[in-house]
Image (cartoon, rainbow, N blue to C red):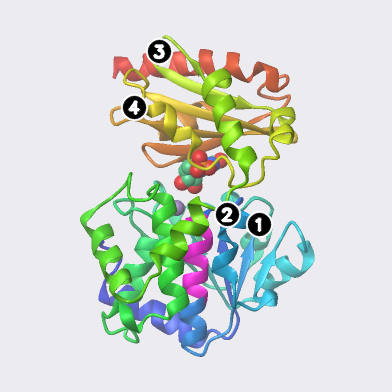
């Protein structure tokens, strides 16, 4: 992790101690890693006597609510629910810490506030191709499980922590463990030696895996599992190219009461089929369809999302969007779009 060096840590330490109003920002539709890394940074700053607030583009899924218990409500602002106050936090901040995204546009409508902010900005992220020119200090590492893992190694290098995980605030310990757990699908993907070192350090420092796992995986409503049954039996389509795709239109989401976070992990399941190289889940969301792409080694979800779905991400886990009606006339056309675009994409990949 070349960005975690003496100079960068000293620079971060100076920025944190000189700032009096810190804004912590993460990506749109925050997931466990986005919220976990943000809360871990927040609790670290608070424990050191600093002032910080978290600005989220959208509300987090309810099953992550346990992470925010004990945190002052006014310290987490959700832009879609209080636009001007949330934007003001960024505008008024004298330091902005950006976690788990690589470019301002990934914060959706917070992009303008980030662009106009004159405050120094720190990036802590694990995605490909970070937009380095926008930041004053960059910690970017793709060979880690999650932004939470990268932040763990950064915090461990900070003088206050003295390399001991037990010196991290308890709230940071659970938040970091949660972010790593969701981004790795509970230790299934993107596990590096450094990931297990982190997990070991956090467990020894008192991370409550039972609390985390029960909240992440055992708190859903019945309808989520019924929806999964419907998807696997009726909705999943397999193409001759080895692509599995699932389209969830608004009607289906309404029928099964789908809330944010309910479909987390579904897109990975079709990869268990031997001949499937890539799996795509599309969710209708107003005038766009949000796309999740997962691939097996040797097929690039990142390139597919970037070249065909207006997005990007990691090599084997990426996302994007299809605009309605610019990319597809309506959600009923999503299947056809996926089939023709993945056919083109995989033919190009085969030729490489
Ligand atoms: P998910 O499918 O879980 O929403 O996203 C998978 C990965 O792709 C995440 O690391 C996420 O940050 C990234 N990602 C999701 N949507 C987009 C997008 O629209 N643009 C880019 N550049 N990355 C995305
Ligand atoms: Mn992440």
**First-in-chain label (1 vs 3):** 1
Q: Which x, y percent locates residue 195?
A: 28, 58
Number of residues whose C-alpha sits closer than 10 Å to that of mark 3, classed few (under 14), some (14–19) or many (20 or more): some
Number of residues whose C-alpha sits closer than 10 Å to that of mark 2, classed few (under 14), some (14–19) or many (20 or more): many
Q: Nearer the viewer, mark 2 or mark 4?
A: 2
Which residue is disc 2 drawn over?
30
Q: Is residue 161 magenta?
A: no
Q: CA distance from mark 3 to mark 4?
A: 12 Å
Q: Is residue 270 visible?
A: yes
**First-in-chain label (2 vs 1):** 2
- Residue 66's quadrant in the figure? bottom right
For this rendering, which residue is in front, 174 or 27?
174
Q: Is residue 202 left or right of residue 257?
A: left
Which residue is disc 1 drawn over?
57
**First-in-chain label (3 vs 2):** 2
Residue at point 31% right, 54% down? 144
Which residue is disc 4 drawn over?
299
Q: CA distance from mark 4 to mark 1?
A: 31 Å
Which residue is disc 3 drawn over?
241
Stretch of the chain drawn in magenta? 32-42
Across the whole image, how many numbered discs are drawn on residues? 4
Q: Which x, y percent locates residue 252?
A: 70, 29
For this rendering, which residue is in front, 56 or 72?
72
Q: Which x, y percent locates residue 240?
A: 42, 9
Mark 2 vs 1: CB contact within 8 A: yes
- Residue 320's quadrant in the figure? top right
Residue at point 30% right, 15% down? 351
Q: Quadrant of the C terminus?
A: top left
For this rendering, which residue is in front, 152 or 102?
152
Q: Secondary structure at mark 3?
A: loop
Q: CA distance from mark 2 to mark 4?
A: 26 Å
């Amino acid at each position: 992790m070349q960005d975690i060096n003496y100079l960068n840590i000293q620079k971060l330490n100076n920025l944190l101690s000189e700032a009096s109003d810190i804004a912590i920002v993460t990506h749109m539709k925050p997931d466990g890693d986005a919220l976990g890394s943000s809360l871990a940074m927040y609790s670290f700053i608070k424990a050191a006597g600093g002032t910080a607030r978290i600005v989220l583009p959208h509300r987090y899924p309810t099953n992550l609510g346990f992470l925010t218990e004990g945190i002052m409500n006014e310290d987490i602002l959700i832009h879609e629910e209080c636009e001007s106050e949330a934007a003001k936090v960024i505008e008024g901040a004298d330091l902005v810490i950006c976690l788990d995204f690589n470019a301002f546009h990934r914060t959706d409508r917070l992009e303008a506030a980030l662009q106009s902010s004159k405050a120094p900005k720190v990036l802590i992220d694990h995605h490909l191709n970070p937009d380095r020119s926008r930041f004053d200090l960059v910690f970017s590492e793709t060979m880690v499980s999650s932004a939470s893992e990268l932040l763990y190694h950064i915090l461990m290098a900070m003088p206050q922590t003295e390399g001991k995980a037990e010196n991290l605030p308890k709230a940071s310990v659970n938040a970091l463990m949660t972010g790593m757990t969701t981004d790795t699908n509970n230790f299934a993907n993107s596990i590096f030696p450094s990931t297990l070192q982190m997990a070991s350090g956090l467990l020894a420092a008192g991370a409550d895996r039972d609390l985390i796992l029960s909240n992440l995986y055992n708190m859903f409503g019945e309808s989520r599992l019924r929806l999964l049954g419907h998807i696997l039996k009726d909705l999943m389509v397999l193409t001759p190219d080895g692509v599995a795709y699932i389209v969830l239109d608004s009607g289906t989401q309404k029928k099964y009461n789908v809330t944010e976070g309910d479909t987390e992990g579904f897109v990975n399941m079709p990869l268990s089929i031997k001949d499937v190289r890539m799996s795509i889940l599309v969710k209708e969301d107003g005038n766009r369809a949000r796309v999740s792409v997962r691939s097996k080694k040797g097929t690039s979800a990142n390139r597919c999302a970037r070249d065909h779905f207006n997005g990007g991400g990691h090599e084997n886990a990426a996302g994007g969007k299809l605009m309605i009606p610019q990319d597809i006339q309506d959600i009923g056309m999503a299947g056809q779009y996926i089939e023709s675009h993945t056919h083109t994409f995989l033919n190009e990949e085969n030729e490489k």
